[in-house]
Amino acid sequence: MALYGQKQFHIVNHSVPREDGFDKVTGRATYAADIKYPNMIYAAMLRLVGVASAKVTKIDTSKALKLAGVLAVFTADSFPKMKSWARYFYITDTVRYVGDVIAIIAAETYAIAEEAKKLIHVTYEELPAVFDIREAMKEGAHPVHEEYPDNIFTDSIYTLRKGDTEKGFEQADLIIERTYETQYAEHAYIEPEAVVASEDSSNGEMTIHASAQNPFFTRRYVADILQIPLNRVHIIQETLGGSFGGKEEGVGLLAARAAFVCHVLHRPVKMVYTREESILESSKRHPFLLTYRAGVKKDGRIVAWEATQIGNSGAYNNQTQFLNWRACAHCAGAYDIPNIKSKTFGVFTNNVHSGAFRGYSSPQLLFAQEQFIEEIAEELGMEPLKLRLINCLRDGSTVATGAKVSEVLLPDIIEYTAKQTDYTKKYEQNKTQSGRIRKGIGMAISHRGCGYGAESPDAAGAFLIVNEDASVLLHSGIAENGQGLKTVYCQIAAEALGVPYENIRFFGTDTHRIPDCGMTVASRGTVMGSQAVKKAGEKLNLILREHACTLGFFDSGKGGAPNDRIAQDLVLREGHIFDPSYHEYQVPLADVTNIALWKGLNMAAYEWHVPDPCIQEHDTQQGRAFPTYSYTCVVAELEVDTGTGEVTLKNVHSSHDVGTAINPALIKGQIYGGIVMGWGYASMEEVVLKNGIVGSRNLDEYLIPTAMDMPNMKVSIFECDDNSGTYGAKSVGEPAIECVAAAIANALYNATGRRIRCNPAGLENVLIGRKLW
Amino acid sequence: MVDEKDYLVANNLNEAKVLMHEHCGNIHVLAGGTDLMVALREGKRSGRDTTYLLDISNIQELKAIERKKVTISDEDCNTNEDYIRIGAMVTFDEAAHSGLLLKTAGALCEAAKSVGAQQIRNVATIGGNVCNAAVAADSLSALTILDAKVVLEDLRGERVLSIGEFITGPGKTAINEDELLTEIRFKPLEDYYSAFVKLGRRKALAISRMNVAAALAFEDEKITEARISPGCVFATPRRVQSAEKILIGESPSEELFMEAGEEVSKEMVRITGRRWSTDYKYPALSAVTFKALAIAYNQAKSDT
């Protein structure tokens, strides 16, 4: 048992208040849409709403240009032709999905720009289109991109081979196969995308205030469209009203469009999405078509596993290849299976593009895998809990990529959570219920590779500056997304540097102040991104102790000590330097820094951290995919009205191995949020697309859970001695959501005896087994 | 983007009637605005083509919930009887917590509680909900089992219509362009036990997938009166008399309520035909009706 509370730290591992909490709660926080410049203009985007695939033949802008206050109308002909990171044109004349922009109108006010949209006359030819994975893969289907004639996104194909599945299936007493399907889901962050672009005409520098998840990523779009060096593009990340993976490509597109309009018209430009535009053009969670086949021995051992995991990429390639790499590494769930074969790939369709969204494929895969495990258990006539414990990862197990894992708390977490929720007893009792309202209990477990792993070098830097008053500025290229990163980084800096938490300030991420540290994604911020913060803190801690010696604070006689001390004899903690042997004598840090400044001593440290490489063999994906894994077990309890299909989520117990809980309160916040987001994904969230047309255009139609839909939530935080991450921390942002929909689906089956193999479980799906749209 | 409107405020009923007359056809009443503001932003529905918005939230005469003897002659009613009068500008929050309504129209209080979320209930009004005439309006099924009537006024005078007469189709009413809906009135259902059950896709801020209002009266363990009105099912609100007949004269039981529920679904299919959604709506409507009847009956049981 390793529940939170055993570790000894001074500042990390404690629930300090959020660095940005006060500003957000009092409404003082500044968001990108709040930024104003004198002489600022607005730009609006025109789309062929209602057409998913078309060639624009003519755009008549003459009437719009005559409207007072309209400054310019840009079309594909008058805008730079380069493509974005996800291979978009910023303005296109070939519409591949309903979000594609075909014109941009710049005007003195937002209202005029919107009015001008109505005066633009567009002539187009509608083209054939494909919308569904199965349809897109049919012979002769319309190719969404010429480069991919069969619509299969070849760069996103990953195949994994572990052991010998043929032999494995031969040994099996039972072979079972099932197919599952998941839906498009919207991030539904509270703040729609916004940018403000402003150019300094004296030196050609472009400054963009942006609701960017990854300011450095956004910077590339702007530099590319303007064809200027990166050092002339200054991206300032404003307070972010949520992102969850959604403000990457979308904000890059917006920033580049605003920058170009600003550059041409020599006026600051604001562009803010309406909620409808945000839902139309922002990326979505990839829908997946998932087929699993397992060979099992009578005693419950899974000896062979085959997976076919097909993602719907939508109209553009927005990260499908990276997401599929992760999906491939996690193709067999949190189980130790000797023989595995899997294929993962993406398919282009004329739908909204799929991209990064909290979990990065895991909520989809687990929805299928964790139901599949229970379907296997049922065929075997075995309790699902027992089947999980027989096969789950434990110390010395090998994951799907063949790498050995250690410090695995998963079996303990499963048993603890089952016991706390009285899982087995309730599970059995629920099977024999009668009556209209039925109870259900369901479990799901997961392992999640922490950080980038072998996807990309998980390197990052940090810069710490101590001022003469002992206050500290922290710079990092990893950005606050609302997850609490500033707070956690300040805690880590304070712990390493030996100053009070309140002394550290991390005011935000700005591309002019620190090198590109990669993206704030993959739940890597705390586990890997902050390694450099710790390193810089430790380095500066030593530097300051040296200064204390150099400046004579620890000469012989000081504090009653007979000899001169060197830095290694001293401790800097909580803002005081002292010799532990003579600890009554404590020198306040500010006394040292005040003098050090005027003596010309360095009081800043910059560090860069590169973790040990993770290397896999490409064709089989065998090797070390991740430095370590987080482990999760979720148990959900619910009630189903079998007359109407109404589901009430009653209790969710979410248990996580977080390695070291850097800030337990923030971890709980992440997990509560993950539970609610997972509940929405399981029960009501679906971007309804009919022939590529988005049906749920705003939050009155795209439903997410309200406060009234929240279950009782219990969080159990486990810690372990795995030291791969900073201070032993592991990922939690994405583990928080990934098991929830799967546990709910299993609970629904426990309640009703009906499997929901096609997410989400809305009223109709629960009652009659299919959706009505 | 919301179109700009000239915003007018009436401080009393007469002022409002004058303004409605003066700008007849070019003015839209703002009676809370929780639907209207959304419609204006989307450039949809009524309000789009008018120049003026008339805010009537300052009119005190429209804000009372009271028991009153009504003297206007009305062929259905004896003028000596009490009426409950709800001013058109009574908010859902006020309706949900009105002691008078809790005693005389429990289902309406439940319906009011189920509207949107607290912020919406604080401003949305019962008059606005009725005039909006949405198929999924939460108040309409409850008002239908109350056999409620609406009072329409203009400078010439007033007229009284039943809910059934007033609502002529989805989103359509019999109101004239210069008329204001000033009150909703009904005979108190003091001997009845009533219930309202809403089925939505989430627990708050949900548009009814369907709802049912039901009222039952008992004597000697037998059902003497029954009223059932499903919402979101028919183009205009109505009671389902064939289901009510099944109940009247019988002893309450689960089987009986199930039978009545099934009859409501049958009536839905008879009137609207089988549709793509019927596979779901048929069993669900029966279940929601059953639930409403069971709640009404349980109130009666706990009362005795």
Image (cartoon, helix red, strand yellow):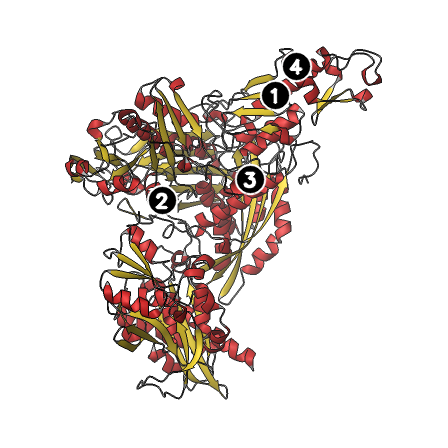
* Residue lying at 43% horizontally and 65% vertically, measured from the top left: B92
Q: Position of residue A179 (x, y in %)?
A: 40, 45
In the rendered image, which residue does mark 3 sit on?
A21
Q: Which mark is residue A275?
A: 2
Callout 3: residue from which chain? Answer: A
In the rendered image, which residue does mark 1 sit on?
A466
Q: Which mark is residue A596?
A: 4
- In the picture, which quadrant includes the C terminus of chain A? bottom left
Q: CA distance from mark 3 to mark 1?
A: 24 Å
Callout 4: residue from which chain? Answer: A
The answer, for residue A344, to whether it is visible in the render is yes
Tell me the amino acid under the disc marked 1: Val
Mark positioned earlier in the residue sequence (3 or 1)? 3
Mark positioned earlier in the residue sequence (3 or 2)? 3
Q: Nearer the viewer, residue B167 or A40?
A: A40
Mark positioned earlier in the residue sequence (4 or 2)? 2
